Amino acid sequence: MTDWHQFLLAQGAVIGEDAVVHFDETPADYEQLLAVDTLCDLADLGVLAVTGAKSADFLHGQTTADFVKSPPTGPIRGACCNPQGRVFTLFTALRTDAGYLLIMPRALVAPSREALARYAALSRVELADASAAYRILGLAGPAADRLASELEEPNGGGSIDGTRALCHAAQRYLLLVPTAVAEACWAALAQCARPVGLPLWHLADIRAGIAALSPETREQFVPQMLGLEQRGAVSFTKGCYTGQEVVARSQHLGKLKRHLYRLGFAAPAVPKPGVPLAIPQGGQPAGTLVAAAPAAAGYCEALAVLRDEAGQCTALEFGDGTRAVTFLPLPSAAA
C-alpha cells in the first residue's frame, strides 16, 4: 500500500482494488451528493508524457485531436486509433514547457506508450509513463468553478505548486496535482468539498455521456461509437492521422450502425466493462457494455455501445441472464 493510500485511509477512505470505494457514503446517498461539492481520488487515471520540440506535430498526426489549432491553455480531448480506426485510448491533454501530458486510463498508459513508440523515434519525441509523478483528483459541484480557478494562476499557466485544473464537464474538473503536494491539496479542498469514492465520479460520467475505455474494450470502437465527436474530441478538418480514413468514412457516409446508449437496470453487482450484450429470444449480438456504476441500492446505470435496433429492446441478455433495461437520456452533446 502506498503512502498516498495510507493518507487516504487516515482521512476515512475505504479502499479496494487500489481505489477508494467510499468515504462512508452508499449508493442511496448518490443523488444528494451529486448536487453538492465533492472531491474524489481518480486512481484509475494515469499520465503519459510526450516531450520534445515536435510533440505537437507528433500528436497531431497520431490522434483525432487538432494540436495545431488548439489554444495554448486548456484541455485538449482526443483519442488514439489503430490503422483500422478503432480507439485504443482516450485522453485529456494539457500543454507543458516540455511538451504535453496526456491523462488517460491508467491501465492503458503502458500499451498506449508501446503503440505510439513505433512512430515516436522518427518524430524526435520521447514517451514516458509519468503516472507516479502526479495524483489526479476529481472536483465537482456548485463551487467547483471557483475552487478550480483559485488553483490556477490568472494566466491559466497553473498554480505555483504545479497543480493544473482541467474542465471535464459542467461544474466538474480534473486536477493534476504533483505527488509531493497532493496531501496538502487534498486537505485544503476537503475543507470545502466532501470526499467521496470513485463510483460516484463514474456515475456522473455515465450521466454526462462521457465514455471510458478499458483493456477489455480497447480497439473495439471507432470514435463516433463512443460519442467522441460530440465532445469535441475528433477533428474532421485537420488532415491525416492514424486511422483517419476509417473515422472520416464512418462520419461522412452515415452508415454507422452502433452508437452510445445509457441504460438503467437492476443488478446485485456492477457488471464489468466489456461484457457482451445480446437481444433475448434468439441471442443476436446487441453490443458491448462500456462502463457501469451503482446509482442506487441494487440498481446500476451504464453506457453501452449497441446496434441501433437493440435500442428498442425492453430487456437484454448479459452477465448471468436476461435483465429488464430502461433506456435513459443522454445530454444533447453526447446523444
Image (cartoon, helix red, strand yellow):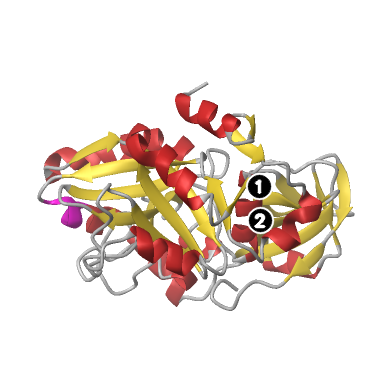
Taking the view exactly as shown, the residue that stands out farthest to the top is: 1
At x 45%, y 52%, the residue is: 86
Quadrant in the picture for residue 106? top left
Disc 1 residue type? Pro
- Magenta range: 54-58
Q: Could one spot residue 243 in this view of the protein?
A: no
Residue 166 image position (x, y, % from top left): 38, 60
Query: Do the residues under discs 1 and 2 have CB atoms within 8 angstroms?
Result: yes
Magenta stretch contains residue 263:
no
Residue that numbered label 2 is attached to:
203
At x 43%, y 76%, the residue is: 252
Residue at disc 1, secondary structure: helix
Specify the principal SS of the magenta part. Answer: helix
User: Which is more toward the observer, 194 or 306?
Assistant: 194
Residue 98 image position (x, y, % from top left): 15, 47
Residue 64 image position (x, y, % from top left): 34, 61
Disc 2 residue type? Leu
Residue 30 image position (x, y, % from top left): 73, 56
Residue at disc 2, secondary structure: helix
Residue that numbered label 1 is attached to:
199
Q: Could one spot residue 66 in this view of the protein?
A: yes
Above or below, 67 relative to 200? below
